[in-house]
Image (tube, grey):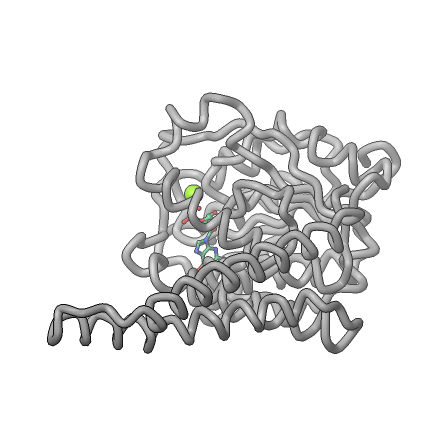
Amino acid sequence: MYRNKRIGIVVPAYNEETQIERTVQTMPDYVDRIIVIDDMSKDRTVEIVQHLEKEDNRILLIKHQTNGGVGKAIGTGYIWCRENDIDIAVVMAGDGQMDPDDLPGLLDPVVEDRTDYTKGNRLITGEAWKKIPRLRYLGNSVLTFLTKIASGYWHVTDSQTGYTALNKKALHLLPLEDIYPRYGMPNDFLVTCNIYNMRVMDVPIKPVYDIGEKSGIRITKVLFSLPLLLMRLFFRRMIQKYIIRDFHPLVLFYTFGFILFLLDIPLIVRLLYLWATTSYIPKINALAILFCTFIGMQSILFAMLFDMEANRELKG
Ligand SMILES: Nc1nc2c(ncn2[C@@H]2O[C@H](COP(=O)(O)OP(=O)(O)O)[C@@H](O)[C@H]2O)c(=O)[nH]1
Ligand SMILES: [Mg+2]
């Protein structure tokens, strides 16, 4: 128990034979249950966890019969927590990249009901730039920005961290069965939280690298799939939140902005074509491009401002 709350730690683990033991053994004493979700690991992960299960009765191993991905594994862990009366469900990776010393910082705001969901933020400490591999840092920055637009949590940074704590209300309210199964899970989950009006708070944590972990993320693969996912999530949130559950004119601003940008495309093509073939730029065409670009940009910026305003009280 931590300040009278039952704490469950969800640990997704795939091929973590070198890391899982240390991860599980360094869990603080106040943790009530440790739910390790294996996903058909090809190494000795299962064997090691089964051995640990005998030593520590807080540990529970759940084995997926097919590899469903890290998001699905977290979903399984959350569902277990929901059915087993856990008050706060924490996610910690099985590769030891999350420092248990940071846990109270994540738990306190949830215990004190200042927020529904805390997530770690590795960027607040100035060390992140030195510790996180450069390419990942830059990729993370781009994804964070796109996630702000998609999720409406404009105050949330470092969208890709998986170190989080979720309260009981959210466990029971959110559709845990529909969590995005693969690496886009943190982004998808934030969007779902926003649709359900959950308060979200960033908490500083230490970035941990070079402890023998090996990331399963292939940059070339997520480079295209995650931005596409974020676009889908953006539209889902707009429809669910601002059309179906409520109506907000910001949808009109976004739509108008997009239409103007789309109109820009044929106008620019036409201008370039005429310019190349006749060396002459038609004035009306050029003006129309300026009009579409500026008004389009302004509409989109207004829509973003309205979105920030509408989500202000969800800043935990
Ligand atoms: N259950 C399960 N866990 C996974 C899967 N892929 C990754 N993980 C776990 O999710 C955590 C984070 O994955 P990792 O590849 O280290 O991502 P990174 O730290 O963001 O680079 C680790 O504990 C992995 O063992 C999977 O397919 N299934
Ligand atoms: Mg990792």
For residue 71, which quarter of the picture?
Answer: bottom right
- Tell me if residue 273 can be seen: yes
Q: Which sits in the foreground, 177 or 247?
A: 247
Q: Which sits in the foreground, 169 or 87?
A: 169
Q: Which sits in the foreground, 76 or 242?
A: 242
For residue 281, which quarter of the picture?
Answer: bottom left
Look at the image and tell me in which quarter the C terminus lies. top right
Residue at the location (44% across, 42% down)?
A: 141
Q: Position of residue 269 (x, y in %)?
A: 26, 74
Look at the image and tell me in which quarter the N terminus lies. top right
**Is residue 233 shown left or right of residue 273?**
right
Residue at the location (80% across, 47% down)?
A: 313
Instruction: Please tell me how many numbered marks the rendered image carries.
Output: 0
Q: Position of residue 278 (x, y in %)?
A: 12, 74
Residue at the location (53% across, 27% down)?
A: 206
- Tell me if residue 59 can be seen: no
